[in-house]
Image (cartoon, helix red, strand yellow):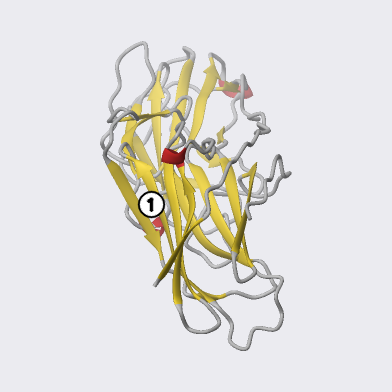
């Protein structure tokens, strides 16, 4: 077993996209009527990082939570996505009704949980936990505050919900410039070591996540993915992770592959303990790691928008 160390120095800047639901006021219906909600994304999206094409869409029966304050009844109600493409939602755990003509606020989030804490004067909080596999980790999302103005029935409309991603994605692509391999090398495993703290609570008005342990702790979490994919000249999305976006969260990145001769080889691509610059994880953004295998390993890194974006910075590692 060969073991190679390739330490990455990384600097990246991030372009932030403005939310499109800031300061939008919705005119409420009369007291006693049920509040109707719909998902206002275009397209209607969430992230299913466990799909082969990294598709991003809400699917039928996805469960969304809505927390109401002010001029409406009920505090935390579950809704589910319908089968249509109009973003319609139907309640699964009660309803929210207008209680007065006073102004109020709605906070929506994904996925729904009954475990919501709220203190008057602050925003509702939900628990967050990154699972050991990306397939099991929810794409935590939030709308922020959806303000509703005091109003009258003839001006009423349904309440639109526009979701934002709260986690940071980490995507790994693999490729090679070599076209004369007798046998294609295989990417067997990618291991990401983070600081302890991939568990905490999310403010659903901002999407900010507070971890339950200090990032100064020496404890670590290890996450693994085993794509077992052939390395070809075509850049392939090999592994996807989602983490709580925090400074210095990523401590180490390791790779295991089988080379063209059938020899298992391990590489350390990044090790924060050597003084390498932090790999950025940004709320609602994707950090894209590209690994170029040419009988050695080269690695580039960029930070992009969640679905489609611009390269901000990249550095080759030899």
The residue at 33%/51% (across/down) is 222
The residue at 38%/51% (across/down) is 137
Nearer to the camera, 219 or 212: 219
Looking at the picture, does residue 209 appear above or below residue 171?
A: above
Q: Can you give x and y, in whole percent of width and height, for residue 183 in the image?
A: 58, 87
Q: Can you give x and y, in whole percent of width and height, for residue 92 in the image?
A: 34, 46
Q: Quadrant of the N terminus?
A: bottom left
Nearer to the camera, 307 or 263: 263
Looking at the picture, does residue 317 appear above or below residue 310?
A: below
Looking at the picture, does residue 149 appear above or below residue 217?
A: above
Q: As drawn, is 246 to the left or to the right of 23? A: left
Nearer to the camera, 24 or 281: 281
Q: Can you give x and y, in whole percent of width and height, for residue 263 in the image?
A: 46, 79
The image quadrant of residue 313 is: top right
Q: Is residue 132 visible?
A: yes
Residue bearing mark 1: 137
Q: Please rate how many residues cluster around mark 1, counting C-alpha atoms within 10 Å: few if below 14, some from 14 to 19, many from 20.
A: some
Q: Quadrant of the C terminus?
A: bottom right
The residue at 45%/40% (across/down) is 274
Q: Is residue 141 visible?
A: no
Q: As drawn, is 67 to the left or to the right of 212? A: right
Q: Can you give x and y, in whole percent of width and height, for residue 186 in the image?
A: 52, 76
Q: Residue furthest bottom?
A: 182
């Amino acid at each position: 077993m060969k073991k190679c160390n390739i330490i990455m120095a990384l600097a990246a800047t991030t372009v932030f996209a403005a939310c499109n639901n800031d300061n939008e006021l919705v005119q409420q219906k009369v007291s006693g009527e049920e509040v109707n909600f719909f998902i206002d994304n275009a397209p209607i999206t969430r992230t299913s990082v466990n799909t082969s094409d990294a598709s991003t869409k809400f699917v039928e029966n996805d469960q969304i939570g809505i927390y109401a304050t002010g001029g409406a009844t009920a505090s935390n109600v579950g809704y589910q996505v319908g089968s249509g493409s109009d973003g319609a939602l139907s309640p699964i755990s009660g309803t929210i009704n207008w209680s007065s003509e006073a102004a109020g606020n709605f906070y929506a989030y994904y996925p729904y949980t009954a475990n919501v804490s709220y203190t008057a004067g602050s925003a509702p909080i939900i628990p967050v936990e990154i699972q050991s596999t990306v397939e099991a980790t929810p794409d935590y999302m939030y709308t922020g505050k959806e303000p509703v103005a005091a109003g009258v029935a003839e001006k009423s409309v349904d309440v639109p919900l526009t979701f934002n991603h709260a986690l940071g994605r980490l995507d790994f692509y693999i490729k090679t410039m070599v076209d004369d391999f007798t046998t294609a090398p295989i990417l067997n495993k990618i291991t990401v070591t983070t600081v302890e703290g991939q568990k905490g609570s999310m403010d659903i008005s901002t999407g900010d996540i507070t971890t339950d342990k200090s990032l100064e702790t020496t404890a670590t979490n290890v996450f693994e993915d085993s794509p077992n994919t052939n390395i070809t000249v075509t850049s392939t999305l090999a592994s996807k992770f989602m983490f709580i976006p925090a400074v210095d969260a990523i401590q180490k990145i390791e790779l295991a592959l089988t080379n063209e001769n059938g020899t298992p080889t391990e590489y350390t691509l990044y090790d924060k303990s050597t003084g390498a610059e932090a790999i950025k994880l940004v709320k609602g953004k994707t950090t894209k790691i590209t690994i170029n295998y040419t009988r050695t390993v080269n690695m580039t890194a960029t930070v992009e928008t969640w679905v489609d974006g611009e390269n901000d910075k990249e550095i080759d590692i030899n």
